[in-house]
Image (cartoon, rainbow, N blue to C red):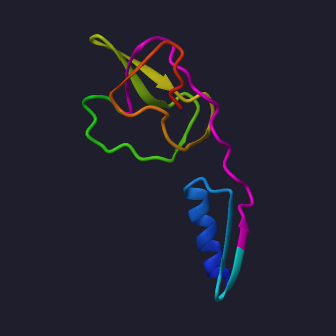
Amino acid sequence: MNDALRARLLELMNRHGIGWFDYEGPDGAIALDAEEPEQAHPPIFARTAGVFLWRHPVDRNVAVWPRRVRQGEVIGWLKIGPLLEPVRAKQDALIRRPRLVDGTLAGYDARLF
């Protein structure tokens, strides 16, 4: 495998949160271990019951996962009647995907991420 292909594969692995890649085919085998796998985010639980939203209701951008986040960044919302409570990242890390589907009712202490 040439250096350009190896660098490209490592970049894709880091972007998508893949720590290890192994492929074996008729033309050969490739095994890569990301030099510095991104730290996964610890679990986040709902502090109250509400409807879980991936993005703010007026935000028209598409939610993209996996996603790198910074500590304190708003990564979701809990809608409680007319109120919106932000769900914030606990640390700088990679969030692979939410545990709940957008618009799902989340009970108290339900795992969101």
Residue 1 appears in the picture as rendered: no
Which secondary structure class fits the magenta region best? loop
101 and 48: which is toward the camera: 101
Q: Position of residue 30 (x, y in %)?
A: 70, 76
Residue sitting at x 45%, y 15% = 107
- Residue at the extreme front: 26
Bounds of the magenta segment = 31-54
Q: Is residue 99 left or right of residue 63?
A: right
Q: Position of residue 94 (x, y in %)?
A: 59, 43
Q: Is residue 64 left or right of residue 95?
A: left
Q: Position of residue 95 (x, y in %)?
A: 55, 41
- Is residue 50 on the magenta stretch? yes
Classify residue 41 by image quadrant: top right
61 and 101: which is toward the camera: 101
Q: Is residue 32 left or right of residue 102?
A: right
Q: Quadrant of the N terminus?
A: bottom right
Residue sitting at x 43%, y 21% = 86
Q: Position of residue 35 (x, y in %)?
A: 75, 60
Classify residue 11 by image quadrant: bottom right
Residue sitting at x 61%, y 58% = 14
Residue 80 appears in the picture as rendered: yes
- Is residue 65 on the magenta stretch? no
